Amino acid sequence: MAQGTVQVTHTGTSRWRRRTGEYASLTAALEAAADGDILTVAPGTYRENLVVDRAVTLLGQEGAAGSVRIAPPEGVPLAVRASAQVQGLHIEGQDAAVPAVLVEDGTPELTGLRIVTRSAAGIEVRGGGRPTVRACTVDNPAGVGIAVVDGGGGIFEECEVIAAGQSGVAVRGGGRPRLDRCRVHHAAGAGLSVTGDHSSLEALGCEIYEINGSGVQIASRAAAVLTDCAVHRVTGNGVTLDTDAVLTLADCRVHDVPENAVDLRSRSVLTLTRSEVARFGRNGLSVWDPGTRVDAHRCEIHDGTGDYPAVWVSDGATAVLEGCRVHDVPDALCVLDRGSRADVVDSDLSQVRNIAVSVSGGATAELDDCRISGAGRGAWFRDHGSGGTLANCTIDAAQTGVIVTKGADPLIERTTVTSPTEAGFYVSAGGRGTFQGCRVTGSEGYGFHIIDGCRSTLRKCRTERCARGGFEFAQAGADGEGAVVEECSSDESTQLGSPAAATAPPAPATQTAGLLGGVPSPRSTTPEAPEAAPEPAPETRPADTVLADLDALVGLASVKREVRALTDMIEVGRRRQEAGLKAASVRRHLVFTGSPGTGKTTVARLYGEILAALGVLDRGHLVEVSRVDLVGEHIGSTAIRTQEAFDRARGGVLFIDEAYALSPEDSGRDFGREAIDTLVKLMEDHREAVVVIVAGYTTEMERFLSVNPGVASRFSRTITFSDYDPDELLRIVEQQADEHEYRLGPGTGEALHKYFTALPKGPAFGNGRTARQTFEAMVERHAGRVAQLSAPGTEELTLLYPEDLPALP
């Protein structure tokens, strides 16, 4: 029963049509109204199912927001089937089988509706409905926020989905809506979901965030165009395309995503223009399956937070990058599997921790006019059938510019490698490759290093200032063939002291008469090199001295107790053995749990020194690794990497940071499990040679230890590193100040304590690292202040004041 009255005013100009009336219910008023009438609804609660099937105007009377409530006990609260105008109503639905607002026909205008419901959908548009929906909000924790289905359409302007139990916006069955400056957040399904033949969506200036799933999901031959939109803070992929989906992203931002920023599969097509992809946990662009393709133009992909390539192309997919920047990532571009292809033009790949371009499994990569800088490896063509072209490229400050192995056969043209630390171009293990007009300058190793009788072809290449030699060749293969070298040159000054020249006689190789004298003849590398002098063991400090360093660390009281207890057990066990008594077996492998910056690496280093001082370890040195150091990109390489890391740690401590990354929850194509299995076997086979410490966040480490039954049994105990409190953070700053000859001025200590108390302690909080960064920021602000003084004295140069504190984030 309605509470309140409805006034109906006819707006016609004919005298006989002028009339007004008041009705006790909305249903009665709607039945009496004609096209063009205005229905003004007084404040109150109307428990009616409204059907608007005439071109009327339905207005909530001005007053407090939500003062006109449409709240029937069941059914559709508001159904619109005509080109009506509805404004200022509060809609509440209780029927999970139907929508709260249903638009079935006409071009109605819905303005300022507030929909708080537990319905199948907050707003549903179907059939011939083409509404214009402005400034409406939907809060529907039981179903879809906005659904456009069965050929429906319409425009949604400045609307907001506050919460949805399923998708925020769902388009299916040929729906074709447009979203303009809308916000979708706190949805339990995808933020935007578009599925099915002829379904499409256009979004302009929209924001999708706080989504429990994919931010945008396009599937099953649907299409969408997003312009100037932002997708962030989701729990799944930022954008997911599947099964012939088509998407265009222009001037968009996808960031702060724990999974793939953009994931394409099953013949989907993405066009990405002037867009930014940042802070993604797995791949920035993940492209799978034959027929799947991404075209990225003038985009930026950066700051990968996991251990995955920024761009992943596999299973026959294609990626095109033109005028793009990829930087601050573990790996930039990984192309694998026969039929997969990447074309990269006029793009920059920089600050890549591992490999800028990796090509394997018969894939192809074509790079033209690209720049690679600050990478561990520039480009690596890994195996048989893998190839492509590098043309007019530059590679600067990489360990090795280009690597070709295991039968790969790329064409490298007019490519310059500057300042590599190992080699400009390295070919081994049956790799081939053609190098034309290439140049290496300033190598700390060789310019071109061709070994194992590889049949590479070098034409018109040149090296300059290469410390170990411009060109180094192995002897020819068993069939007498080797590298072909034509019209190449090198400056002579770098040829002195080549190790191969001193230890190996010349050996035959295929070489044309055009080779200039500056290039040395191919040399054999098969004779064994003189045995290197063993690396001297580091000086071992007494255990008491190292324990004193441990005690000097700020905080960590429980950690110190645990380490001392473990040390005491080892020391007493050693003394019992010396006395001819049985010693208790002490497993020395440890689990360190806690947040970043709590001193886990420092304590691991001291623990190694203590064990060396007690004679348990030979050297006690620390080898720190993470997932990227242990996990390879193809079958078999992970075991090799893990073995190499373990061998480097012999006699010391192998410290695996963020060890849980070896066992990601979604590990379908992941080789992390192989690293764990290899590590478990090595720990068993060489239990006395290496102490292994695994470290990471507490919850994630619990999951890691449960992955392999043999893992948990290898570790004697877990030591938890608690977060530093404000007093301890203040002490760290005081230590930093003393070390760098600064002092805290009056009131600075109290200001720092308040600062650390108020500082947010979220996932980005770095504990001791944050304290050190705070001190560095204070020193920088102090310098900016003191630099303005004409003749600062000692106090001005050393005292830090509260005003030097940085602002709270």
Image (cartoon, helix red, strand yellow):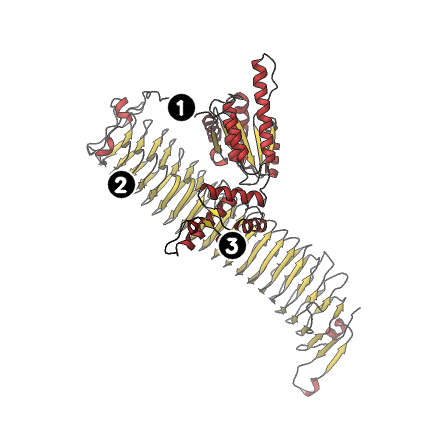
The mark closer to the camera, 2 or 1, is 1
Please determine whether, in this image, residue 101 is positioned above or below residue 541: below
The percent coordinates of residue 340 (x first, y second) are 44, 41
Residue lying furthest top: 580
Q: Which mark, by number, is residue 807?
A: 3
Give the mark nearest the N terminus, 3 or 2: 2
Q: Nearer the viewer, residue 406 or 450?
A: 450
Q: Which mark, by number, is residue 437?
A: 2
Relative side of 364 to 62, left or right = left
Name the residue: 57% across, 22% down: 570
Q: Measure the C-alpha gap from mark 1 to mark 3.
A: 48 Å
The percent coordinates of residue 210 (x first, y second) are 59, 53
Relative side of 327 to 512, left or right = right
Q: Amino acid at mark 2?
A: Gly
On the rendered image, what quadrant is the N terminus found in?
A: bottom right
Mark 1 surroundings within 10 Å by alpha-carbon count, few (fewer than 14), some (14 through 19), many (20 or more): few
Q: Measure the C-alpha gap from mark 2 to mark 1.
A: 44 Å
The mark closer to the camera, 3 or 2, is 3
Secondary structure of residue under mark 1:
loop
The mark closer to the camera, 1 or 3, is 3
Mark 2 surroundings within 10 Å by alpha-carbon count, few (fewer than 14), some (14 through 19), many (20 or more): some
Q: Amino acid at mark 3?
A: Ala
